[in-house]
Amino acid sequence: MNTATRPTADKKLTLKDGSKVSIRPILLEDLDAVYGFFKALPEEDRAYLRFDVTDREVVEERLREIQKWGRLKRLVACVDENIVGTGVLELRDSEKDFNLAELRLIVGHDFQRQGLGMLLARELYFLAAREKISELRVHILRPQEAALSIFRRLGFHAVEVLEDAATDRYGKLQDVVILACPLEGLWREMESLVEDFDIQHR
Ligand SMILES: CC(C)(COP(=O)(O)OP(=O)(O)OC[C@H]1O[C@@H](n2cnc3c(N)ncnc32)[C@H](O)[C@@H]1OP(=O)(O)O)[C@@H](O)C(=O)NCCC(=O)NCCS
């Protein structure tokens, strides 16, 4: 099977420090676990997220949307049943943007810099390839430096900067940097970046 279209199911992967992680689509039953994950994030990692993930109702509403709206897909990364990271692929549904999708990643503080962001991005890439998406985009607020680094490393480049277009959780206006990457280019970057540490256990 072409690796680029390999389906995403429950996958067991290994991080740089040797931790075993499984990545799978989120379920409605994950509400408590995912809410616990968001609440445990350090304030600086939550401050620039699009939704107030400390509000359980907001988290539940988002989860229900995922179950009923096929164009929103969320994966969770788990270690021993605990959620340690999550990634979202949001497919656009306007006729003009039908081949575009937006990607979002969050990795728990204790699991950062172990390659998990990269592995989640790769799984979202597989989902995007299945949906015949040709370009991925990310919307980053200017202070999200780790996010800018990972996406630049994956070959994303800035296509637009919307000045003062978003308000962060501190009530401060922030520039939104929109980065884009054609799906084809992304695969080349990912293959070389994750092959060093990812060993799959199927
Ligand atoms: C952005 C984020 C998802 C990265 O996750 P991660 O698992 O730590 O990323 P990885 O370990 O896969 O990092 C891959 C590469 O990205 C770059 N990178 C990641 N975090 C970085 C940081 N804090 N500073 C500089 N570069 C960084 C590095 O090049 C890194 O490779 P290296 O560790 O070999 O140097 C994580 O920092 C996070 O959840 N931040 C808070 C939420 C957020 O801003 N999400 C993005 C919204 S789309």
Image (cartoon, rainbow, N blue to C red):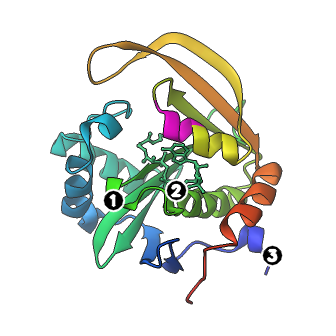
The residue identified by callout 3 is: 2
Picture quadrant where residue 118 is located? bottom right
- Say if 170 sits above or below 163 in the image: below
Query: Residue 92: in sight, yes or no?
Result: no
- Say if 55 sits above or below 8 in the image: above
Residue type for callout 2: Gly
The residue identified by callout 1 is: 110
Q: Is mark 1 within 8 Å of ligand 1?
A: no
In this image, 106 relative to 46: left or right?
A: right
| Residue displayed at 71% across by 60% down | 190
Disc 2 is placed on an element classified as helix
The residue identified by callout 2 is: 117
Residue 145 on the magenta span = yes
Magenta segment range?
144-148
Mark 1 or mark 2: which comes first in sequence?
A: 1
Residue type for callout 3: Asn
Circles 3 and 2 in contact, beta carbons < 8 Å: no
Name the dominant secondary structure of the magenta segment: helix
Residue 73 marker:
none
Residue closest to the eye, 75 or 108 = 108
Disc 3 is placed on an element classified as loop
In this image, 22 relative to 118: left or right?
A: left
Residue 194, given in percent of the width and then of the height, sits at 66, 66
Residue 38, given in percent of the width and then of the height, sits at 26, 49
Q: Is mark 2 within 8 Å of ligand 1?
A: yes
Residue closest to the eye, 84 or 66 = 84
